[in-house]
C-alpha cells in the first residue's frame, strides 16, 4: 500500500471512529455512573499483549503514544499507521443474578513518521472515558394508606463519554536520550438520568438528571533513555508526566416531577468551573535480550484525590448540589509484560512471529458512597503476525490479543464484572520519503 493510500485510509478511519463515538459508548458497566465514566485502555497493538506495559519501549517500527519521546526513534523512511478494535463479552453478577452484554468498539487510530532528523511526529484519536448503562431496581413498599402494597421502581440510564485527538513530537538531542510532548484536545458530554415511578398512578413520579459538556486541553511529557548493559542486553527507562488543571465547564442538575402522562415542572441548578483534570506520573523499565526477548514493567499514578467535581451533598438543611473534592481517589496501575520474537533475522515467517503475555492491576479512581470503587485485575496473551510487503523494508503487523479483566470491590452486595476481549490491532509499515538515485 502506498503512503498516499495509507493517509487516505487513516482519515477514513478517523471518520469511522468519530461516528462510532457518536453511536455507542462501548461500555455496559453500572460503575460508569461514577466520575467521568470508565477509563479507556491505553494499550496499543504492539503492547496490548503485554498488558499495556510500554513506557520505556521505542523502536524504528514502534508507534508508542503512551510515551511521546518514542517518536524520535521512528525510522526516517517509515510511515506507521495503527488502528485497533475490540470485541468484548462481559459477565456481570450480583446476588445470584447476572447479565452478559456484548460490545464491539474501535479503540484508536493513529499515525507517525520522521519529521526532521532526530524528530518524530505522531497524531491520532482515541476514547478517554466511556459511559453506558441501563438498569432497573424494584422494591415493594408497605401498605401505609390502606390501599394495598405498592411497588417502587427506579430506572437508571447513563450515556456519553469523552474523546481526545492528539498531536505529538519526539526529539533525540543525543543518541540514547529522547524527550517528547503530546498535546491533546479533550471533548465530550455525559448524561446520568434516574426516574422513580410507583405502581399507584396517583403518586407523582420523580426524575433527576446530571449532565454536562466537557472540552479542554491536555499536555503530556515524556522522556526515554537507553542504557547498554553488555553485548546482548539493553535497559530502557521511560518517564512520563501529565499536567493537571481546572476545567471551566458547567455541570447541570435537573429535578422533575411527572404525572402518569407528562412532566409537571422542573428545577435546574448549574455549577460553573465544575471539573478538574489530575496530574499524572509514570515510570517504566524495559530489558531487551538479543533483540528477541523484551520484559517491561510500568507504574502509573493519577492524582485524582481532591480534584473538583459536582456532588450532591446531604446537609442539615437538605441536599445541596455543589462543587466538591471527595468523589475521587488516587489511581495506581501496575503492568508487567513480556514479548518474544524467535529470530528477527530469520528467513521464514514463523521466525518473525511476536509472542506476548502480561498481567495488570489497578486501583479505582472514583468512590461509591464514600468507599473506594472496584479494583481491576487483568491478564493478556497475544501474538503478532507479520505481513510482508515488497514496497516496505519492514513488515506490517497484525496483532491478536486475548484479554481477561476482573472488576470487583471488597464491599458486599456490589456488582462483580468479568470481561473477555479479543483485540485486533493492525500496524501498517509503509515506505516514506524514499529517495531514488539515477546512475
Image (cartoon, grey):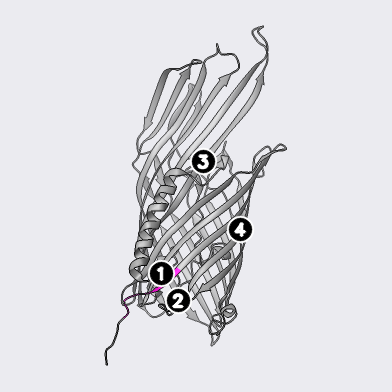
How far is the residue under mark 2 from the one under mark 1? Answer: 14 Å
x and y percent of residue 352 in the render? 55, 78
The residue tagged 3 is 132
How far is the residue under mark 4 from the one under mark 1? Answer: 25 Å
Rendered residue at 35%/40% (across/down): 249
Name the image quarter holding the N terminus.
bottom left
x and y percent of residue 180 in the render? 37, 67
Q: Mark 1 falls on what kind of element?
A: strand
Residue 429 is a magenta residue: yes
How far is the residue under mark 4 from the one under mark 3? Answer: 21 Å
Please tell me whether residue 61 is drawn above or below residue 310 in the rendered image.
Answer: below
Ranked by sequence position, the earlier of labels 2 and 3 is 3
Q: Mark 4 falls on what kind of element?
A: strand
Q: Nearer the viewer, residue 286 or 187?
A: 187
The residue tagged 4 is 403
The mark closer to the camera, 2 or 3, is 2
Amino acid at each position: 500500500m502506498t503512503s498516499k493510500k495509507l493517509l487516505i485510509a487513516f482519515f477514513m478511519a478517523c471518520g469511522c471512529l468519530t461516528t462510532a463515538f457518536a453511536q455507542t459508548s462501548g461500555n455496559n458497566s453500572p460503575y460508569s455512573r461514577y466520575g467521568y465514566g470508565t477509563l479507556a485502555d491505553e494499550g496499543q497493538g504492539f503492547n496490548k499483549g503485554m498488558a499495556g506495559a510500554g513506557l520505556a519501549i521505542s523502536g524504528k517500527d514502534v508507534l508508542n503514544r503512551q510515551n511521546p519521546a518514542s517518536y524520535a526513534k521512528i525510522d526516517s523512511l517509515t510511515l506507521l499507521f495503527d488502528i485497533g478494535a475490540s470485541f468484548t463479552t462481559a459477565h456481570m453478577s450480583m446476588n445470584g443474578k447476572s447479565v452478559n452484554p456484548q460490545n464491539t468498539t474501535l479503540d484508536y487510530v493513529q499515525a507517525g513518521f520522521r519529521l526532521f532528523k532526530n524528530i518524530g511526529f505522531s497524531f491520532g484519536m482515541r476514547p478517554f472515558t466511556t459511559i453506558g448503562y441501563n438498569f432497573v431496581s424494584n422494591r415493594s413498599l408497605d401498605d401505609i394508606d390502606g390501599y394495598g402494597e405498592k411497588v417502587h421502581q427506579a430506572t437508571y440510564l447513563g450515556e456519553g463519554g469523552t474523546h481526545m485527538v492528539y498531536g505529538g513530537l519526539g526529539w533525540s538531542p543525543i543518541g540514547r536520550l529522547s524527550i517528547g510532548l503530546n498535546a491533546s484536545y479533550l471533548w465530550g458530554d455525559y448524561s446520568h438520568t434516574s426516574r422513580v415511578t410507583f405502581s399507584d398512578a396517583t403518586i407523582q413520579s420523580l426524575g433527576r438528571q446530571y449532565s454536562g459538556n466537557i472540552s479542554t486541553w491536555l499536555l503530556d511529557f515524556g522522556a526515554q533513555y537507553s542504557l547498554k548493559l553488555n553485548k546482548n542486553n539493553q535497559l530502557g527507562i521511560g518517564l512520563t508526566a501529565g499536567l493537571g488543571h481546572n476545567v471551566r465547564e458547567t455541570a447541570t442538575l435537573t429535578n422533575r416531577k411527572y404525572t402518569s402522562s407528562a412532566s409537571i415542572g422542573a428545577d435546574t441548578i448549574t455549577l460553573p468551573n465544575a471539573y478538574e483534570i489530575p496530574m499524572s506520573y509514570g515510570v517504566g523499565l524495559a530489558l531487551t535480550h538479543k533483540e528477541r526477548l523484551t520484559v517491561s514493567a510500568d507504574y502509573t499514578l493519577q492524582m485524582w484525590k481532591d480534584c473538583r467535581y459536582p456532588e450532591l451533598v446531604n446537609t442539615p438543611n437538605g441536599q445541596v448540589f455543589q462543587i466538591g473534592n471527595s468523589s475521587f481517589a488516587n489511581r495506581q496501575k501496575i503492568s508487567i509484560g513480556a514479548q518474544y520474537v524467535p529470530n528477527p533475522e530469520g528467513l521464514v515467517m514463523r521466525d518473525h512471529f511476536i509472542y506476548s503475555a502480561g498481567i495488570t492491576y489497578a486501583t479505582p479512581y472514583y468512590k461509591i458512597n464514600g468507599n473506594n470503587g472496584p479494583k481491576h485485575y487483568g491478564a493478556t496473551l497475544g501474538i503478532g503476525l507479520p505481513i510482508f510487503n515488497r514496497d516496505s523494508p519492514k513488515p506490517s503487523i497484525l496483532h491478536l490479543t486475548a484479554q481477561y479483566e476482573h472488576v470487583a470491590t471488597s464491599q458486599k452486595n456490589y456488582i462483580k464484572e468479568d470481561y473477555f476481549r479479543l483485540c485486533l490491532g493492525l500496524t501498517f509499515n509503509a515506505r516514506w520519503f524514499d529517495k531514488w538515485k539515477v546512475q
